[in-house]
Amino acid sequence: MRRTTFLSLLICGIAWAQADDSRPAISNVRGAQYPRVHADLRVSLRLKAPDAKKVQLQPGGDDNGLGHGPMDMIRADDGTWSITTPPAVPGFHYYWFLVDGVAMSDPASETYFGWGKECSGIEVPDNGVDFYAAKDVPHGEVRIHWYSSKTTQAWRRAYIYTPAEYDRKTRARYPVLYLQHGAGEDERGWTNQGRANFILDNLIAGGKAKPMIVVMEQGYATPPGEAQTTTPQGRGTGQPSLFEQVVVGDLIPMIDATYRTRSDRDHRAMAGLSMGGGQTLQITLTHLNMFSWIGSFSAPLRGGQDLKTAYSGAFADPAAFNKQVHLLWFGAGTGEERMLKGALAMHDALEKAGIKNVFYQSPGTAHEWQTWRRDLNEFAPLLFK
């Protein structure tokens, strides 16, 4: 009888171990066993808070692929609160906990700047997809560059990606892509959350993209003496912003003076996501003497605007625009209804006006980093060719 009971327990234990197919997320701090991602992409999270009366999981925003929150967590006798979400959308997702109504980061997760604060984040694998993985290829460097802005009379920080060959081919000069983050994020976003350096490494190593320098700056600027802010700025309203003055008057001259760039407009591109996509359109279309490659990822676009007067009349002469601009590119996820609708409307309006442009839809993703990773992976190979 005892042997039967022991064997039954052993079999049950083996079956349970096989059923628990989850693994620690790669976004966890070193050694943390939770959060865990299951084979069907459900996510299990835990928090030890024995004195709390209520703990909830709060995904970052309604378009977040982790689900809609806040979600109530269940308390165990030892004071550990836990939850398992429905299957998540592959990619990177912000989240935090609400402990008796107070927001706090998950101590088991690395932190990422999003939503105007340091947040937890989880990486949910996209099975069979590795274009943003660190592979056994030559890797470029991500450099942190501080410079003094005359416009804001303050020190600013940019992240600069240089291709793997940059320090070896010391006489070579390179085209530049200025790549902007979204509202509530900063210059760290494209490498920490977006894995842009690995995307470029893999594209360049595979001969799919030209070696290029990528400049990632914070998309905020405040007048001298005012407190810094992460309030959305210059998102495509057609009105110039102080950030636009920083890019044109401070950032580009500094990059061209410091790095081995090809400094003409034919070798200068700009792209951005969400707020950064709106900033990109505002800056590039009103300074076509400086840019000829343009990318808008999930930007808040107004397709009904008069193309002849939009962006200082950049689209007024379709033939001249097509000759001057080598690439005008729009992207959005099929799960972000407002951004997709706006991008499609703009694309259709431009097509009817005879203005060449490219439109890309990321299947199954919303206003999130997996959309923008795919955007960059599709956009970068078209540049500087």
Image (cartoon, rainbow, N blue to C red):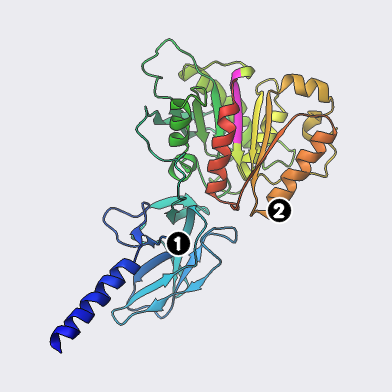
Q: Residue furthest left?
A: 2
Magenta-tinted stretch: 267-271
Counting every numbered tag in the picture gives: 2
Viewer-side residue, 325 vs 136? 136
Residue 265 x/y as whole percent:
63, 19
Q: Is residue 300 above or below residue 254?
A: below
Q: Residue at x 70, y 25 (%)?
A: 287
Left or right, 141 with reference to 372: left
Q: Residue visible at 47% across and 60% down?
A: 95
x then y, percent, for residue 289:
69, 20
Report whether 379 appears left or right of 146. right
Q: Secondary structure at mark 1?
A: loop
Q: Position of residue 258 (x, y in %)?
A: 46, 19
Residue 13, compared with residue 298, is above or below; it is below
Quickly name the residue at label 1. 40
Q: For the residue carrying disc 1, how many other residues have a C-alpha within 10 Å: few (<14), some (14-19), or many (20+)?
A: few
Q: Is residue 229 something one can see in this rendering? A: no
Are circles 1 and 2 on residues that touch, CB within 8 Å? no
Report crowding for label 2: few under 14, some 14 to 19, many 20 or more residues within 10 A (C-alpha).
some
Q: Which residue is mark 2?
A: 338
First reached walking from the N terminus: tag 1 or tag 2: 1
Q: Is residue 189 magenta?
A: no
Which mark's residue is nearer the viewer, 1 or 2? 1
**Residue 220, located in which quarter of the rendered image?**
top right
Q: Amino acid at mark 2?
A: Arg
Q: Main secondary structure of the magenta part?
A: strand
Left or right of 32? Residue 84 is right
Foreground: 220 or 26? 26
| Quadrant placement of the C terminus | top right
Residue at disc 2, secondary structure = helix
Asked if one can make out residue 192 in the rendered structure from this viewpoint, the answer is: yes
Q: Residue pushed farthest bottom? A: 1
